[in-house]
Image (cartoon, rainbow, N blue to C red):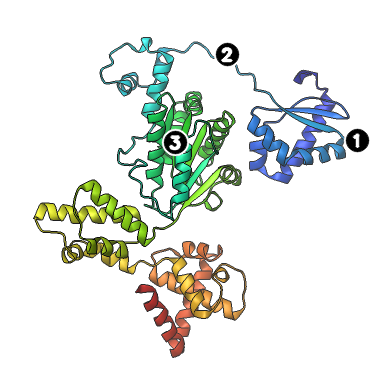
Amino acid sequence: MAQSEVIPSFQQQWDRVLNRLRAEVGEAAYRSWLKPLSLLSGNDSFIRMAVPTRFMRDWVAGNYQDRIQVLWLEEIGVPAQVEIVVQQPVRPVPKPALVDVVEAPTPVVEAVSERLVVDVPNLSTEVVHEAEVQRITAPLDPRFTFDNFVVGKPNELAYAAARRVADAEAVPFNPLFLYGGVGLGKTHLMHAIAHQIRTAHPEKKVIYLSAEKFMYQFVRALRIKDTMSFKEQFRSVDVLMIDDVQFIGGREATQEEFFHTFNALVDQNRQVIISADKSPSDLEGVEERMKSRMGWGLVADIHPTTYELRLGILESKAEQLDVVIPQKVVEFLAHKITSNIRELEGALNRIVAHATLVGRSITLETTQEVLHDLLRSNDRRVTIEEIQKKVAEHFNIRVSDMHSSRRARAVARPRQIAMYLSKQLTSRSLPEIGRKFGGRDHTTVMHAVKKVEELKSTDVEFAEDIELLSRMLEN
């Protein structure tokens, strides 16, 4: 039965049910999942509704269908079966496009080929689309391939998942979400996936870009009132890769568009690959529906490097640079520079450049001399997690107590000490420290710091305890 055949009173009943659902689930969930529902037909025992995509149908059926049936029962007084079907909305036929729909024709033609010299009206739709993809996508670093990626325990899951996605004929899991700290190899894996897909399947359209660039493209489309072209560009690709997705946090309009782009691609069985510095559930300023959706595929984390992995990375890098590095120097760097891979490789580049330009051989002494600032910085670097672990061991409590709400003195005092040491030994802000301690407010951290300082000034034994912990953490 068509929409117009639904009697007005029945539509009014559905509107009342919808309003009750809206009040129950909240505005964000209503806007994403329930607002697109349209009532097709119905009677006292059967209701048929439509949504625009298969993914949306599955989600609504799995999360809201039972509640809809209960509310219908309360509304009409008798049980009713609810059916949700997929029905694409009718779109108006677009007017014939003018030539100037293709934005900035000269750069677009150059993006296809520097030797291609043709008039814009002669460009085929396929060529224009490919040119747009090339304009949007970020350049790939030729060094970032799977062959140049050193695998170890901290990154083996992420590497295996990336290889699986890059080599698979069909989409194995959607999305692939890679996360880890700065400089641990997320971008390397993203580039490696793109390289592999483009080599094995040159016919596939792959867009790789940062979340900031995605946001820029969306804002630009809004500004020139051409959001339809934006949607077509991003929803017609085979593989969409978004790096550093944490940067869309707090950007409601961008999140909304990304969410719908995401759903459209997944619904068409197109591959989506995302990277971030935190897991989906820990992303700040990102709506719950987006967190839930990003965590639905495979989430693979990259842990901080181990000593063995750092050794392997340095040896691989030295081989690429075609230089011989004394084993003592390699071991020294692997021990001393533990923050991230980017800094580790940068240190190796510095000592090789110094040896080449100055003409001095690479020794342990010259390495310490050239990297004195970097080594001093790494010597002072302590993580909040290390502080929590060390303090928990010292006071014989569990690390989980650092995040718990327990207020017993045997737990609360060590927690305050850990907060104090986090403030003294790291560069993290008070709100950041609070979040690491079970999401506590920054005022709680301020109180802990003040309390520990007071106790240090009045209790000699307590002050010695703090000094001992500080030395243990800094060495």
Q: Residue furthest right?
A: 77
Q: Residues within 10 Å of mark 3 (few under 14, many from 20)?
A: many
Amino acid at the residue labelled 3: Phe
Which residue is found at the position 30% from the left and 56% from the top? 344
CA separation in Å, label 1 and label 3: 49 Å
Secondary element at tag 1: loop
Residue 70 figure quarter:
top right
Is the residue 435 above or below the residue 453 in the image? above
Residue at the spot 50% in from the left edge and 70% down from the top edge: 445
The residue lying at 36 percent from left, 52 percent from top is 183
Of discs 1 and 2, which sits in the foreground? 1
In 3D space, how far apart are the residues under numbered discs 2 and 3 (Cα atoms)?
Answer: 28 Å
**Residue hosting label 3:** 214
For badge 2, the amino acid type reads Val
* Labelled disc at residue 33: none
Mark sitting on residue 78: 1
Looking at the picture, tell me which residue is in the foreground, 94 or 409.
Answer: 409
Residue 35 visible in the snapshot: no
Q: Mark on residue 93?
A: 2
Tell me if mark 2 has few (under 14), some (14-19) or many (20+) residues whose alpha carbon lies within 10 angstroms of its own.
few
Q: CA distance from mark 1 to mark 2?
A: 42 Å
